[in-house]
Protein backbone atom coordinates (compact mmCIF):
# COMPACT_ATOMS: atom_id res chain seq x y z
CA UNK A 1 0.00 0.00 0.00
CA UNK A 2 1.25 3.43 -0.97
CA UNK A 3 -1.31 5.27 1.21
CA UNK A 4 -2.48 7.00 -1.96
CA UNK A 5 -5.28 7.12 -4.51
CA UNK A 6 -3.04 5.01 -6.76
CA UNK A 7 -3.61 2.05 -4.42
CA UNK A 8 -6.83 1.59 -6.41
CA UNK A 9 -5.88 -0.53 -9.47
CA UNK A 10 -6.36 1.26 -12.78
CA UNK A 11 -5.70 4.77 -11.48
CA UNK A 12 -2.76 7.00 -12.38
CA UNK A 13 -1.99 10.43 -10.92
CA UNK A 14 -0.01 13.20 -12.59
CA UNK A 15 0.94 16.69 -11.42
CA UNK A 16 1.88 19.87 -13.22
CA UNK A 17 3.49 22.29 -10.74
CA UNK A 18 4.42 25.94 -11.29
CA UNK A 19 6.10 27.11 -8.08
CA UNK A 20 7.06 30.46 -9.60
CA UNK A 21 3.47 31.28 -10.55
CA UNK A 22 2.22 29.35 -7.49
CA UNK A 23 -0.41 27.28 -9.25
CA UNK A 24 -0.77 23.90 -10.93
CA UNK A 25 -3.07 21.03 -11.80
CA UNK A 26 -3.48 17.36 -10.99
CA UNK A 27 -5.03 14.71 -13.19
CA UNK A 28 -6.57 11.38 -12.24
CA UNK A 29 -6.31 9.06 -15.25
CA UNK A 30 -8.58 6.00 -15.58
CA UNK A 31 -7.49 4.44 -18.87
CA UNK A 32 -10.00 1.59 -18.64
CA UNK A 33 -12.76 3.99 -17.64
CA UNK A 34 -14.41 4.37 -14.25
CA UNK A 35 -18.04 4.74 -13.24
CA UNK A 36 -18.29 8.18 -11.67
CA UNK A 37 -20.46 10.30 -9.41
CA UNK A 38 -20.09 13.70 -7.77
CA UNK A 39 -21.32 15.78 -4.85
CA UNK A 40 -21.12 19.58 -4.86
CA UNK A 41 -21.64 20.97 -1.35
CA UNK A 42 -20.01 24.40 -1.54
CA UNK A 43 -21.79 27.55 -2.70
CA UNK A 44 -19.01 28.86 -4.98
CA UNK A 45 -18.02 25.88 -7.16
CA UNK A 46 -16.09 26.00 -10.40
CA UNK A 47 -16.73 22.84 -12.36
CA UNK A 48 -16.98 21.17 -15.77
CA UNK A 49 -19.05 18.12 -16.84
CA UNK A 50 -20.55 17.56 -13.37
CA UNK A 51 -24.11 17.50 -14.75
CA UNK A 52 -23.12 14.46 -16.78
CA UNK A 53 -22.46 12.55 -13.54
CA UNK A 54 -25.98 12.91 -12.21
CA UNK A 55 -28.04 9.70 -12.01
CA UNK A 56 -30.25 9.26 -15.06
CA UNK A 57 -27.88 10.92 -17.50
CA UNK A 58 -26.46 8.81 -20.30
CA UNK A 59 -22.69 8.59 -19.83
CA UNK A 60 -21.55 6.49 -16.87
CA UNK A 61 -17.79 6.20 -17.31
CA UNK A 62 -15.08 8.82 -17.26
CA UNK A 63 -11.50 8.50 -18.44
CA UNK A 64 -10.09 11.24 -16.24
CA UNK A 65 -10.74 13.80 -13.52
CA UNK A 66 -8.99 17.17 -13.49
CA UNK A 67 -8.30 19.16 -10.33
CA UNK A 68 -6.78 22.56 -11.05
CA UNK A 69 -5.72 25.92 -9.73
CA UNK A 70 -6.31 29.11 -11.68
CA UNK A 71 -9.94 29.63 -10.71
CA UNK A 72 -12.34 29.35 -13.69
CA UNK A 73 -9.40 29.89 -16.06
CA UNK A 74 -7.97 26.58 -14.87
CA UNK A 75 -10.86 24.62 -16.35
CA UNK A 76 -9.06 25.05 -19.68
CA UNK A 77 -6.54 22.42 -18.52
CA UNK A 78 -9.20 19.74 -19.10
CA UNK A 79 -8.77 20.30 -22.86
CA UNK A 80 -5.18 19.09 -22.56
CA UNK A 81 -6.32 16.01 -20.69
CA UNK A 82 -8.85 15.32 -23.44
CA UNK A 83 -6.16 15.65 -26.10
CA UNK A 84 -3.92 13.19 -24.25
CA UNK A 85 -6.74 10.64 -23.98
CA UNK A 86 -7.90 11.15 -27.58
CA UNK A 87 -4.38 10.43 -28.84
CA UNK A 88 -4.64 7.08 -27.09
CA UNK A 89 -8.16 6.44 -28.48
CA UNK A 90 -9.73 6.48 -25.03
CA UNK A 91 -13.19 7.89 -24.44
CA UNK A 92 -16.94 7.44 -24.80
CA UNK A 93 -17.83 5.73 -28.05
CA UNK A 94 -19.87 7.89 -30.44
CA UNK A 95 -20.74 7.79 -34.14
CA UNK A 96 -18.03 10.41 -34.65
CA UNK A 97 -15.31 8.59 -32.73
CA UNK A 98 -14.31 8.37 -29.09
CA UNK A 99 -14.87 11.45 -26.91
CA UNK A 100 -12.89 11.51 -23.65
CA UNK A 101 -14.99 12.41 -20.61
CA UNK A 102 -13.04 14.56 -18.16
CA UNK A 103 -15.02 16.24 -15.37
CA UNK A 104 -13.10 18.99 -13.60
CA UNK A 105 -13.10 21.22 -10.55
CA UNK A 106 -10.93 24.22 -9.66
CA UNK A 107 -9.67 26.15 -6.66
CA UNK A 108 -9.25 29.91 -6.39
CA UNK A 109 -5.51 30.68 -6.07
CA UNK A 110 -5.30 33.98 -7.98
CA UNK A 111 -4.56 35.84 -4.73
CA UNK A 112 -1.17 34.17 -4.28
CA UNK A 113 1.73 34.19 -6.74
CA UNK A 114 1.23 35.32 -10.34
CA UNK A 115 -2.47 35.64 -11.13
CA UNK A 116 -1.72 35.33 -14.86
CA UNK A 117 -0.04 31.92 -14.44
CA UNK A 118 -3.13 29.74 -14.87
CA UNK A 119 -3.03 26.07 -15.91
CA UNK A 120 -4.29 25.64 -19.46
CA UNK A 121 -4.41 22.89 -22.08
CA UNK A 122 -0.61 22.59 -22.30
CA UNK A 123 -0.29 22.22 -18.53
CA UNK A 124 -3.10 19.66 -18.39
CA UNK A 125 -1.36 17.63 -21.08
CA UNK A 126 1.93 17.82 -19.17
CA UNK A 127 0.21 16.52 -16.03
CA UNK A 128 -0.99 13.52 -18.06
CA UNK A 129 2.53 12.82 -19.33
CA UNK A 130 3.68 12.74 -15.69
CA UNK A 131 0.90 10.38 -14.61
CA UNK A 132 1.95 7.18 -12.85
CA UNK A 133 0.46 4.51 -10.64
CA UNK A 134 3.33 4.87 -8.16
CA UNK A 135 3.24 6.82 -4.91
CA UNK A 136 1.74 10.32 -5.03
CA UNK A 137 3.77 13.40 -4.09
CA UNK A 138 1.92 15.47 -1.48
CA UNK A 139 2.05 19.07 -0.30
CA UNK A 140 2.54 22.12 -2.54
CA UNK A 141 2.32 20.25 -5.82
CA UNK A 142 -0.15 20.06 -8.68
CA UNK A 143 -3.51 21.57 -7.89
CA UNK A 144 -2.34 22.10 -4.31
CA UNK A 145 0.53 24.42 -5.25
CA UNK A 146 -1.41 27.60 -4.54
CA UNK A 147 -3.73 26.23 -1.84
CA UNK A 148 -4.10 28.12 1.45
CA UNK A 149 -6.40 27.90 4.49
CA UNK A 150 -7.48 30.16 7.35
CA UNK A 151 -8.33 33.23 5.26
CA UNK A 152 -11.13 34.85 7.24
CA UNK A 153 -8.78 37.78 8.01
CA UNK A 154 -7.39 37.88 4.48
CA UNK A 155 -4.52 36.17 2.70
CA UNK A 156 -1.99 38.06 4.85
CA UNK A 157 -3.01 35.88 7.83
CA UNK A 158 -3.40 32.62 5.86
CA UNK A 159 -1.46 29.37 6.21
CA UNK A 160 -0.05 27.37 3.32
CA UNK A 161 -1.87 24.19 2.48
CA UNK A 162 -1.63 21.73 -0.40
CA UNK A 163 -2.62 18.30 -1.63
CA UNK A 164 -2.91 15.11 0.40
CA UNK A 165 -3.91 11.51 -0.20
CA UNK A 166 -4.78 8.42 1.83
CA UNK A 167 -6.12 4.87 1.48
CA UNK A 168 -7.52 1.96 3.47
CA UNK A 169 -8.19 -1.71 2.83
CA UNK A 170 -11.45 -3.08 4.21
CA UNK A 171 -13.07 -6.52 4.14
CA UNK A 172 -12.44 -8.79 1.14
CA UNK A 173 -9.38 -6.70 0.21
CA UNK A 174 -11.43 -3.80 -1.09
CA UNK A 175 -9.45 -0.55 -1.42
CA UNK A 176 -10.95 2.86 -0.66
CA UNK A 177 -8.77 5.93 -1.22
CA UNK A 178 -8.94 9.72 -1.46
CA UNK A 179 -6.96 12.60 -2.91
CA UNK A 180 -7.79 16.09 -1.63
CA UNK A 181 -6.79 19.67 -2.50
CA UNK A 182 -7.34 21.82 0.59
CA UNK A 183 -8.05 25.51 -0.06
CA UNK A 184 -10.65 26.29 2.59
CA UNK A 185 -11.60 29.65 4.06
CA UNK A 186 -11.86 27.88 7.44
CA UNK A 187 -9.47 26.12 9.79
CA UNK A 188 -8.12 22.60 9.46
CA UNK A 189 -8.60 20.75 12.74
CA UNK A 190 -7.56 17.41 14.17
CA UNK A 191 -10.52 15.01 13.87
CA UNK A 192 -11.85 14.01 17.26
CA UNK A 193 -10.05 16.65 19.34
CA UNK A 194 -10.84 19.78 17.34
CA UNK A 195 -7.29 21.07 17.82
CA UNK A 196 -6.49 23.71 15.20
CA UNK A 197 -3.74 22.47 12.89
CA UNK A 198 -3.93 25.50 10.59
CA UNK A 199 -6.00 28.67 10.74
CA UNK A 200 -5.72 32.47 10.66
CA UNK A 201 -2.32 33.40 12.09
CA UNK A 202 -2.17 35.74 15.05
CA UNK A 203 -0.21 38.95 14.33
CA UNK A 204 2.48 38.02 16.88
CA UNK A 205 3.02 34.67 15.15
CA UNK A 206 1.93 32.76 18.23
CA UNK A 207 -0.66 30.28 17.09
CA UNK A 208 -4.02 30.63 15.36
CA UNK A 209 -7.33 32.34 15.79
CA UNK A 210 -10.46 30.21 15.44
CA UNK A 211 -12.31 31.18 12.28
CA UNK A 212 -15.81 30.34 13.55
CA UNK A 213 -15.34 32.60 16.58
CA UNK A 214 -14.08 35.48 14.44
CA UNK A 215 -17.00 35.12 12.08
CA UNK A 216 -19.59 35.00 14.87
CA UNK A 217 -18.10 38.06 16.55
CA UNK A 218 -18.12 40.03 13.30
CA UNK A 219 -14.32 40.33 13.31
CA UNK A 220 -13.85 38.79 9.88
CA UNK A 221 -12.43 41.16 7.29
CA UNK A 222 -11.23 40.80 3.74
CA UNK A 223 -12.49 37.27 3.12
CA UNK A 224 -11.28 36.22 -0.35
CA UNK A 225 -14.27 35.81 -2.69
CA UNK A 226 -13.63 32.17 -3.47
CA UNK A 227 -12.05 29.17 -1.72
CA UNK A 228 -12.64 25.48 -2.10
CA UNK A 229 -11.83 21.93 -1.12
CA UNK A 230 -11.85 19.60 -4.11
CA UNK A 231 -10.89 15.98 -4.51
CA UNK A 232 -11.75 12.45 -5.47
CA UNK A 233 -12.47 9.20 -3.68
CA UNK A 234 -12.09 5.88 -5.46
CA UNK A 235 -12.56 2.19 -4.85
CA UNK A 236 -12.04 -1.11 -6.65
CA UNK A 237 -15.51 -2.21 -5.52
CA UNK A 238 -18.44 -2.30 -7.93
CA UNK A 239 -20.68 0.72 -7.29
CA UNK A 240 -23.45 2.07 -9.49
CA UNK A 241 -23.46 5.63 -10.78
CA UNK A 242 -26.40 6.54 -8.52
CA UNK A 243 -24.71 5.10 -5.44
CA UNK A 244 -21.44 6.86 -6.27
CA UNK A 245 -23.23 10.17 -5.93
CA UNK A 246 -24.40 9.07 -2.50
CA UNK A 247 -20.91 7.81 -1.65
CA UNK A 248 -19.44 11.21 -2.53
CA UNK A 249 -22.03 12.96 -0.36
CA UNK A 250 -21.32 10.80 2.68
CA UNK A 251 -17.57 11.16 2.09
CA UNK A 252 -18.01 14.92 2.47
CA UNK A 253 -18.34 14.12 6.18
CA UNK A 254 -14.57 13.84 6.11
CA UNK A 255 -14.45 17.53 5.21
CA UNK A 256 -16.81 18.38 8.08
CA UNK A 257 -14.59 16.50 10.53
CA UNK A 258 -11.45 18.37 9.56
CA UNK A 259 -12.49 21.84 8.33
CA UNK A 260 -14.31 24.34 10.54
CA UNK A 261 -16.39 25.97 9.18
CA UNK A 262 -16.94 24.15 5.89
CA UNK A 263 -19.39 24.41 2.97
CA UNK A 264 -19.74 28.18 3.47
CA UNK A 265 -20.91 30.70 0.90
CA UNK A 266 -17.22 31.31 0.17
CA UNK A 267 -16.36 27.63 -0.44
CA UNK A 268 -16.94 25.62 -3.62
CA UNK A 269 -16.46 22.14 -2.18
CA UNK A 270 -16.63 19.39 -4.83
CA UNK A 271 -15.95 15.68 -4.36
CA UNK A 272 -15.87 13.11 -7.18
CA UNK A 273 -16.33 9.38 -6.59
CA UNK A 274 -14.96 6.62 -8.85
CA UNK A 275 -15.61 2.89 -9.10
CA UNK A 276 -12.73 1.11 -10.84
CA UNK A 277 -13.42 -2.55 -10.13
CA UNK A 278 -15.88 -5.39 -9.70
CA UNK A 279 -15.37 -6.46 -6.08
CA UNK A 280 -18.41 -6.87 -3.85
CA UNK A 281 -18.69 -4.49 -0.90
CA UNK A 282 -21.37 -2.99 1.31
CA UNK A 283 -22.10 0.61 0.29
CA UNK A 284 -22.24 1.71 3.93
CA UNK A 285 -18.80 0.28 4.64
CA UNK A 286 -17.46 2.03 1.54
CA UNK A 287 -19.01 5.37 2.54
CA UNK A 288 -17.78 5.16 6.14
CA UNK A 289 -14.26 4.42 4.92
CA UNK A 290 -14.42 7.14 2.26
CA UNK A 291 -15.17 9.76 4.92
CA UNK A 292 -12.21 8.51 6.95
CA UNK A 293 -9.70 8.63 4.10
CA UNK A 294 -10.93 12.08 3.07
CA UNK A 295 -10.27 13.34 6.60
CA UNK A 296 -6.80 11.78 6.71
CA UNK A 297 -5.92 13.18 3.26
CA UNK A 298 -6.91 16.70 4.38
CA UNK A 299 -4.68 16.52 7.45
CA UNK A 300 -1.83 15.14 5.36
CA UNK A 301 -2.19 18.07 2.94
CA UNK A 302 -1.53 20.48 5.82
CA UNK A 303 1.36 18.50 7.29
CA UNK A 304 3.07 18.05 3.91
CA UNK A 305 2.83 21.72 2.89
CA UNK A 306 5.82 24.07 2.89
CA UNK A 307 6.02 27.85 3.01
CA UNK A 308 5.60 29.41 -0.42
CA UNK A 309 5.11 32.92 -1.82
CA UNK A 310 5.52 34.46 1.61
CA UNK A 311 2.78 32.33 3.19
CA UNK A 312 4.13 30.15 6.03
CA UNK A 313 3.18 26.53 6.53
CA UNK A 314 1.50 25.36 9.72
CA UNK A 315 4.75 23.79 10.90
CA UNK A 316 6.36 27.26 10.76
CA UNK A 317 3.83 28.77 13.18
CA UNK A 318 4.62 28.63 16.90
CA UNK A 319 1.53 27.25 18.62
CA UNK A 320 0.43 28.78 21.92
Image (cartoon, helix red, strand yellow):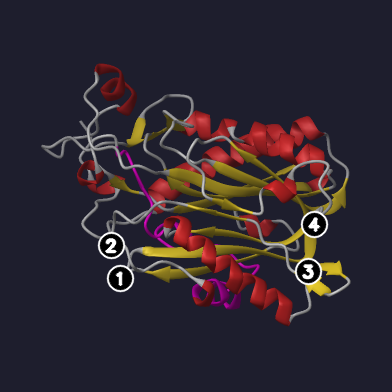
The CA span between labels 3 and 1 is 34 Å
Q: Nearer the viewer, residue 247 or 87?
A: 87
Question: What residue span does the magenta drawing correspond to?
Answer: 123-151
| x then y, percent, for residue 148 | 35, 48
Residue under numbered circle 1: 20
Q: How packed is label 4: few (under 14 Cα within 10 Å), some, or many (20 or more)?
A: many
Asked if disc 1 and disc 4 are in contact, CB closer than 8 Å, the reply is no
The disc placed on residue 91 is 3
Residue under numbered circle 4: 61
Q: Is residue 262 positioned above or below 108 on the image?
A: above
| Left or right, 63 with reference to 97 | left
Residue at disc 1, secondary structure:
loop
What quarter of the picture does the C terminus occupy?
top left
N-terminal of the pair, mark 2 or mark 1, is: 1
Q: How packed is label 1: few (under 14 Cα within 10 Å), some, or many (20 or more)?
A: few
N-terminal of the pair, mark 3 or mark 4, is: 4
Q: Is residue 249 positioned above or below 22 on the image?
A: above
The CA span between labels 2 and 3 is 35 Å
Residue under numbered circle 2: 113
| x then y, percent, for residue 164 | 50, 51
Amino acid sequence: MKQALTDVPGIKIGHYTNRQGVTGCTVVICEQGAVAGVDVSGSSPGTRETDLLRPGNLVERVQGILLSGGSAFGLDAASGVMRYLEERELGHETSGGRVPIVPAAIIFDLNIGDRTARPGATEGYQACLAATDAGVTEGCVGAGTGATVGKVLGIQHAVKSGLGTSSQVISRDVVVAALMVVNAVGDVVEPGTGEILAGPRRPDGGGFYRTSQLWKSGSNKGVPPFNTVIGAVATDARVSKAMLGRLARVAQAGIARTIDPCHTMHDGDVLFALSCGEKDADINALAITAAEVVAVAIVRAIRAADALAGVPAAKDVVKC
